[in-house]
Amino acid sequence: MIEGVLTVWLLHRIVRAWAGPFAAAAALQKAVQTGRLLPLITCGVWVGLAFQTKMLQA
């Protein structure tokens, strides 16, 4: 669980440095507020791929 929290924190820091301080939170909030399925599926795919990558490293 700690690794997951640290991964989200690191991703937030990278996106914040690249696209501005509110971009990471705004992207997630927009996906949830619009209720569109595609951004949520894309998010799930990326999280799944990240998890599989972490499992391969272990």
Image: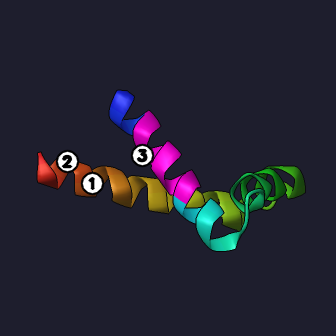
Whole-Å distance between the Cαs marked 1 and 2?
5 Å
**Residue 8 falls within the magenta-colored stretch:** yes
Whole-Å distance between the Cαs marked 3 and 1?
13 Å
Residue drawn at x 42%, y 46% as measured from the top left? 7
Residue drawn at x 24%, y 50% as measured from the top left? 54
Q: Quadrant of the N terminus?
A: top left
Residue located farthest toward the bottom when viewing the structure as drawn: 18
Q: In this view, does 11 lie to the left or right of 16?
A: left
Q: Which mark is residue 7?
A: 3
Q: Residue 52 carries which label?
A: 1
Residue located farthest toward the right when viewing the structure as drawn: 34
State which mark lies toward you, 3 or 1: 3
Q: Mark 2 points at which residue?
A: 55
**Residue 47 falls within the magenta-colored stretch:** no
> Which secondary structure type mostly characterizes the magenta part of the structure?
helix
The stretch in magenta equals 5-13
- The 10 Å Cα crowd at callout 3, few under 14, some 14 to 19, many 20 or more, is some
Q: 55 or 21: which is nearer to us?
A: 21
Check whether the beta carbons of the residues at disc 1 and disc 2 lie within 8 A of each other: yes
